[in-house]
Image (cartoon, rainbow, N blue to C red):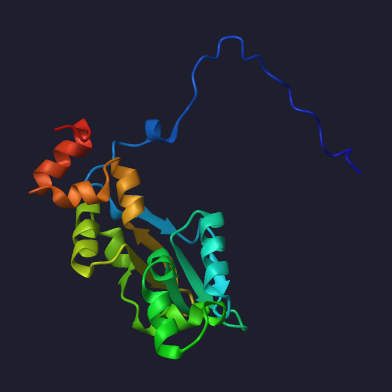
Amino acid sequence: MFQEFHPLQMSTTRDVRYLLRPEQLHEPIGLYSSALHVMTDFLEVTPVCVDQALQVDEALAYMKAQHVRLLFAVDADDRLTGIITAADLVGSAVLSYMQRSAQSRDAVVVKDLMLPIDAAAALQYSQVEGARIGDVMQTLSHSGGQHVLVIDRGIAGIARIRGIISATNVSRALKVGFDVMYEAKSFAEIERMVTHGNQS
């Protein structure tokens, strides 16, 4: 069965002293870099989804286990119905809903707190392709959110969520805390932080 395959010749690593790292293949990322650098592309990364009927504490535990701060909610037919963030699950939203609905915490599910997908704002992928990280920062700042969805259309013209941009991704890419960036008085000051690190 395996006659068509052959073992490959191994080489020695006697003179190897260096590791290749992704940052060595790219220019340093800054405010003027492509916004695609801070977009999680669902062509490459599987989005994290939960059933909209999942109890909120279970959803929070799953969110922590997956190391994300946003979950996509789907119905029994696996259709996208909404999004829910860590802030929705750990803030006052749960208690407020419990008071309004007179339900116990155990009865509160993702669907009760999620932002319906019809009410979410998004950028077109074509916009992100032509945008810079600084543009995305301004977008997040004006929206007041920590995430922005990115949509495109497939070959059949069907709209779909192509990816997501988060404040966390921006901070990670620029190596500067998002809150710190917003305390800066100008983009020039942010650029200085990105170039030289967050030093006073």
Q: Position of residue 88 (x, y in %)?
A: 40, 71
- Tell me the quarter of the image containing the C terminus: top left
Q: On the image, which quarter does residue 41 sit in?
A: bottom left
Q: As drawn, is 148 to the left or to the right of 131?
A: right
What is the quadrant of residue 152 in the picture? bottom left
Using the image, determine if residue 42 lies above or below residue 77.
Answer: above
Q: Of residues 18 and 149, which is closer to you in this image? A: 149
Q: Nearer the viewer, residue 149 or 54?
A: 54
In the orientation shown, which residue stands out farthest toward the right?
1
Place of residue 124 in the rendered image (x, y in percent of width and height, measured from the top left): 32, 70
Name the residue furthest bottom.
101
Considering the image in quadrants, where does the N terminus appear? top right
The answer to whether residue 188 is seen in the rendering is: yes
- Residue at point 56% right, 62% down? 62
Q: Position of residue 80 (x, y in %)?
A: 50, 79
- How many numbered marks appear? 0
| Foreground residue among 94 and 165 | 94
* Residue located at (27% from left, 65% from top): 127
Q: Is residue 160 visible?
A: no
- Judge whether 127 appears above or below 75 on screen: above
Residue at the farthest top position: 14
Between residue 148 and residue 13, name the one nearer to us: 148
Residue at the (56%, 75%) spot, across then down: 55
Query: Residue 40, image x and y in percent?
Result: 42, 57
Q: Residue at x 38, y 84 (%)?
A: 118
